[in-house]
Image (spheres, grey):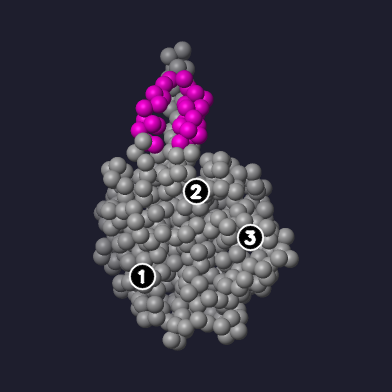
């Protein structure tokens, strides 16, 4: 009996240690997130640069995924033994399309036109730690010259609202604050610019191998209810924040075959993380499930990445019918309205929120209005503070993470003093390295 109890205690300590190791208290894990974010920022910048009139939506999606997969050279030498890959396939959604737009080669072609509002979203994992990033681009109309706000008043309102909502989130998403604080500030900004937050779009905690964690919330009200306003943000957590605003009512619906033939069926899926008890009779289904598990694990993937699109449809339909994979359908707003997005990943450190995967709204047409016009808002101080902390998006260069940070962690001699002792050791490493991190550019969070 005592042997069984000792075994249970060892298993409990092992599970606790795993939990500690997988949080950003562990400096290696913090570095994993930041390397993934550097790759995501680079891929996002590449797609933004290629987002020009006449560009193919399919080609932009392929470009983003390829940039992620071919980013081995940007990873620090001492971290190259770890795998990296796509945590969410590149999605390019135009105008009233809300998201999850990842067309196939066999779909009717879609192109970027002058004046379009383009939302780009992607995800990257490094050693199975994922980050998410997204931004909005206003493609220059006509000759590409600056667009007077008077010529595009509603687009100026939409881009300004999205930009300042993201600044508010950067400042208010910090340990001790609640979801209600974040939602109230974003609602104030949206209302100021006569826009609406699209409900039902989840911001979520990120965990190892999970892009949809156990703490999730929507920044838009659905039927006037806010059931998750009581969620409190805690130190050590990682969040992917999704802000989607619309010039319309914010209502969303599934893309129809008539209006969007290329988007009427889902092209993004994710394998369920739980074990399966259902037996697959079709050989195509068994082969496809093995392929998904080997190449994508439980991260979302595009149907295009599986190879012959026509050949895998039967197996994919069988897996979906048995709830072994989950579809990500494409949603749209009313055809006369436009949607903009800001999406970024934030680490909640003891220094404050640290945005790692982040790209400001691409204001190449200079439509974003001055911050001074928002002085009457209750969240104005948060907007000012968020603007001061706005990180610059680096499109070039390697991530420079210190070897000695990892060496110190591995030579601390993690003994058998139980989870509390191990947590104290990890926190000691974290605290001792924080000053070096600031000096080396690994940690840049602040108030």
Q: Write down the region rendered in magenta.
A: 405-433
Residue at the limit of the structure toward the top, as seen here: 2
Image mark for residue 60: 1
Marks 1 and 3, how far apart at CA = 32 Å
Residue 55 picture quarter:
bottom left
Q: Secondary structure at mark 3?
A: helix
In this picture, is 405 found above or below 43?
Answer: above
Q: Which residue is tagged 2?
A: 444
Q: Tag 1's secondary structure? A: helix
Q: CA distance from mark 2 to mark 1?
A: 31 Å
x and y percent of residue 219 in the render? 61, 59
In the rendered view, tell whether residue 317 sits above or below residue 291. Answer: below
Q: Residues within 10 Å of mark 3 (few under 14, many from 20)?
A: many
Name the residue at 41% across, 59% down.
394
Q: Which one is nearer the viewer's eye here, 217 or 40? A: 40
Asked if the residues shown at circle 3 and circle 2 are in contact, with their CB atoms under 8 angstroms apart, the answer is no
The residue identified by callout 3 is 383
Position of 74 compared to 175: left or right?
Answer: left
């Amino acid at each position: 009996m005592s042997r069984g109890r000792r075994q249970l205690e060892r298993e409990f300590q092992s599970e606790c240690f795993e939990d500690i190791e997988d949080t950003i208290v562990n400096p290696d894990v913090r570095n994993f997130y930041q390397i993934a974010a550097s790759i995501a920022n680079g891929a996002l910048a590449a797609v933004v640069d290629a987002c020009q009139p006449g560009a193919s939506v399919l080609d932009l999606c392929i470009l983003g995924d390829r940039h992620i997969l071919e980013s081995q050279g940007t990873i620090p030498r001492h971290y190259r033994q770890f795998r990296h890959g796509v945590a969410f396939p590149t999605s390019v959604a135009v105008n009233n399309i809300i998201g999850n737009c990842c067309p196939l080669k066999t779909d009717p072609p879609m192109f970027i036109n002058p004046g379009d509002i383009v939302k780009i979203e992607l995800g990257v994992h490094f050693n199975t730690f994922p980050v998410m990033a997204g931004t909005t681009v206003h493609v220059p109309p006509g000759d590409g010259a600056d667009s007077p706000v008077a010529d595009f008043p509603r687009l100026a309102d939409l881009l300004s609202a999205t930009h300042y909502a993201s600044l508010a989130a950067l400042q208010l998403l910090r340990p001790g604050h609640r979801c209600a604080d974040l939602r109230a500030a974003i609602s104030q900004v949206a209302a100021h610019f006569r826009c609406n937050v699209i409900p039902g779009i989840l911001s979520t905690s990120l965990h190892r191998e999970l892009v949809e964690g156990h703490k999730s919330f929507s920044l838009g009200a659905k039927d006037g209810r806010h059931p998750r306003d009581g969620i409190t943000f805690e130190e050590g957590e990682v969040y992917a924040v999704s802000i989607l605003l619309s010039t319309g009512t914010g209502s969303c619906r599934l893309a129809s075959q008539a209006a969007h033939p290329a988007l009427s069926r889902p092209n993004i899926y994710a394998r369920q993380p739980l074990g399966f008890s259902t037996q697959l009779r079709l050989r195509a289904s068994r082969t496809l499930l093995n392929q998904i598990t080997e190449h994508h694990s439980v991260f979302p993937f595009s149907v295009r990445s599986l190879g012959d699109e026509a050949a895998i449809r039967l197996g994919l339909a069988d897996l979906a019918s048995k709830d072994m994979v989950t579809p990500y359908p494409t949603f749209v707003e009313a055809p006369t309205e436009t949607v903009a997005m800001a999406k970024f990943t934030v680490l909640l450190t003891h220094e404050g929120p640290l945005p790692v995967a982040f790209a400001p709204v691409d204001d190449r047409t200079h439509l974003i209005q001055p911050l001074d016009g928002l002085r009457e808002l209750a969240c104005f101080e948060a907007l000012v503070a968020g603007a001061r902390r706005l990180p610059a998006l680096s499109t070039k260069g390697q991530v420079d993470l210190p070897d000695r940070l990892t060496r110190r962690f591995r030579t601390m001699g993690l003994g058998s003093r139980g989870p509390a002792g191990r947590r104290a050791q990890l926190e000691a490493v974290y605290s001792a390295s924080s000053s070096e991190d600031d000096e080396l550019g690994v940690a840049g969070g602040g108030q």
